[in-house]
Amino acid sequence: MLHTITKIKDIDERKFLDIYAEGNAENAEELYPEYEPAEALAKAEASFREFLLEFFSEEGNTYYILEEDGVWVSALRLSATGEREYYLEALETRPDLRRRGCAKRLFEAVFAELKKGGGFVIRDCVSKRNLPSLRTHEACGFAVVSDVGTNYIDGSVNERCFGLEYDCR
């Protein structure tokens, strides 16, 4: 089942944090090295919650979450950047469920949902070193359109990333 979430109150926090556990653990280690691991993780998760409040305050920002057998398995967030244009961030699958096609099923469900409103385009910025993510994107119809990635929210560019696009217009 696909969950389309536009308000923070609609997030099941525990299930959601389980998807992003690895990223929060990495952030805890990097951003709060002076704290014990449990306290650092709590700080990273609190920071993530603050980000979510800001993210959901913007019109058109949406998290899509794939649920299977009662478990939230994979998620991504889309920010509206224009008429039927979106910027994709934070594609993530629970670490214990990777390499099982969860992200592909999530993409398929999101594409089907967005197609209900007509054509659309999704842009993304993926690290050149993140080969599993690059392969997943390409297998789902994304094309590399630039040797540098662009963050379509703040306009910054990153030479360590590729710019990808899924065009369904």
Image (cartoon, helix red, strand yellow):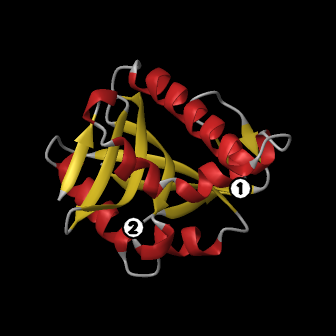
Q: Residues within 10 Å of mark 2 (few under 14, many from 20)?
A: many
* Vertical placement of residue 20 versus 105, above or below: above
- Mark with earlier residue (1, 2): 2
Q: Nearer the viewer, residue 17 or 89?
A: 17
View extreme (bottom): residue: 100
Give the left or right position of residue 114, taking residue 33 as reference: left
Q: Position of residue 153 (x, y in %)?
A: 57, 30
Which amino acid, mark 1? Cys
Do residues under tags 1 and 2 come within 8 Å of each other at their CB atoms? Answer: no
Location of the N terminus by quadrant is bottom left
Give the left or right position of residue 104, taking residue 10 as reference: right
Name the disc covering residue 85, or none: none
Q: Residues within 10 Å of mark 1 (few under 14, many from 20)?
A: some
Q: Residue at x 34, y 29 (%)?
A: 8
Q: Nearer the viewer, residue 147 or 113?
A: 113
Can you see residue 7?
Answer: no
The mark tally for this picture is: 2
Which residue is under mark 1?
Answer: 161
Q: Position of residue 29 (x, y in %)?
A: 76, 50
Q: Residue at x 25, y 60 (%)?
A: 67
Which amino acid, mark 2? Ala
- Which image quadrant for residue 68? bottom left
Can you see residue 91?
Answer: yes
Name the disc covering residue 103, or none: 2
Q: Position of residue 157 (x, y in %)?
A: 73, 40
Give the left or right position of residue 68, taking residue 56 as reference: left
Q: Residue at x 19, y 69 (%)?
A: 69
* Vertical placement of residue 137 versus 12, above or below: below
Tell me the SS state at disc 2: helix
- Which dot, 1 or 2, sits closer to the camera? 2
Q: Nearer the viewer, residue 69 or 14?
A: 14
